[in-house]
Each structure stands twice: as structure tokens, then as C-alpha cells.
Image (cartoon, rainbow, N blue to C red):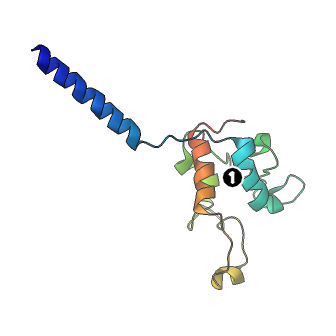
């Protein structure tokens, strides 16, 4: 019985070690260091507080992003898939055009500039991690 318990314990230790090696740790995403630079580069040309934009969504700061715009909250902490901010980057946004806005001509010519998948993933991960002002 003692050897059976030792064998079981060894199997558990091996299983935990293999499982731990196979998992990638998700780094904590910072609003200031990771998310805001993406928003600044791609979104602030239109969504700055001093600009008029139809959505009334300003992205100059965490507080303004959190306040949302005409269509309500831009994100739901912990729920990136349901957050309008993420959904607006998709090919079929819930309302209006895909962001960042490109001219119809650029889109038709295949020259539109969208966020890279990694940039969208960074913002989504930040939202899923609680969308903190960090």
C-alpha cells in the first residue's frame, strides 16, 4: 500500500510539472504601457477630446475611455468579447464602420490600415484582466 501511495504521489508530481511547463503565463497588461500607446497611435487622430466625432468617445485618458460615448460603455471589465471597443476592430462591428476608420477607396483597394491582431489581443487581454488604470 505504501508503494502504491508513493507511485500515485510521483504520478501527481509529474503531471503537475508537465502541466505547468505546457502553460504560457499571461503577462499583466498595463493601460499606460501597453494599451494607451496603441490607442494613441491608431485612435486619437479622431477620438481625441478636442475633436468632434460622431460617437462622442474620447480616448485621451483612462477616465475618458471608461466614461464611454454615445453608444455607452466602451468596455466591460473581464468581458473583452462583449466590449464594443474590441468589436469595433472586427470586420463586422456591431454598429457603424470598422475602426480605425479608413476611406472606402483604401478598403476597396486592399490598402486599409487596421490594428494588427497582436494589438487587438493586447487590448482584449487588458479588458479580460479587469481593465485597470495601471
Outermost residue toward the top in this view: 2
Quadrant of the snapshot with the N terminus: top left
Task: Give the image quarter of residue 47.
Answer: bottom right
Outermost residue toward the right in this view: 50
Task: Give the image quarter of residue 38.
Answer: bottom right
Q: Residue at x 63, y 50 (%)?
A: 123
The number of discs equals 1
Q: Residue at x 75, y 42 (%)?
A: 32
Residue 68 visible from this viewpoint:
no
User: Image check: 37 left or right of 93?
Assistant: right
Quadrant of the snapshot with the C terminus: top right
- Of residue 36 and residue 28, the one placed in the foreground of this image is 28
Residue 105 vertical position relative to residue 27 in the rendered view, above or below? below
Residue 22 vertical position relative to residue 115 in the rendered view, above or below? above
Q: Residue at x 71, y 84 (%)?
A: 105
Image coordinates for residue 84, horizontal then vertical, percent: 62, 53
Residue 65 visible from this viewpoint:
yes
User: Image check: 77 left or right of 14?
Assistant: right
Q: Residue at x 53, y 41 (%)?
A: 26
Element assignment for label 1: loop
Image coordinates for residue 75, horizontal then vertical, percent: 63, 45
Image coordinates for residue 54, horizontal then vertical, percent: 78, 61
Residue 54 vertical position relative to residue 111 in the rendered view, above or below? above
Q: Which residue is mark 1?
A: 71
Task: Give the image quarter of residue 50.
Answer: bottom right
Image coordinates for residue 114, horizontal then vertical, percent: 66, 68
User: Image check: 110 left or right of 40?
Assistant: left
Mark 1 nearby-residue class (10 Å; few <14, some 14–19, many ≥20): few
Amino acid at each position: 500500500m505504501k508503494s502504491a501511495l508513493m507511485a500515485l504521489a510521483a504520478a501527481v508530481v509529474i503531471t503537475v510539472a508537465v502541466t505547468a511547463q505546457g502553460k504560457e503565463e499571461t503577462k499583466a497588461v498595463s493601460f499606460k504601457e501597453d494599451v494607451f500607446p496603441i490607442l494613441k497611435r491608431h485612435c486619437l487622430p479622431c477620438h481625441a477630446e478636442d475633436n468632434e466625432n460622431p460617437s462622442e468617445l474620447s480616448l485621451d485618458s483612462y477616465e475618458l475611455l471608461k466614461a464611454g460615448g454615445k453608444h455607452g460603455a466602451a468596455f466591460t471589465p473581464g468581458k473583452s468579447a462583449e466590449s464594443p471597443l474590441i468589436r469595433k476592430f472586427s470586420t463586422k462591428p456591431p454598429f457603424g464602420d470598422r475602426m480605425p476608420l479608413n476611406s472606402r477607396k483604401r478598403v476597396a483597394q486592399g490598402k486599409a490600415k487596421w490594428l494588427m491582431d497582436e494589438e487587438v489581443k493586447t487590448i482584449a487581454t487588458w479588458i479580460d484582466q479587469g481593465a485597470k488604470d495601471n
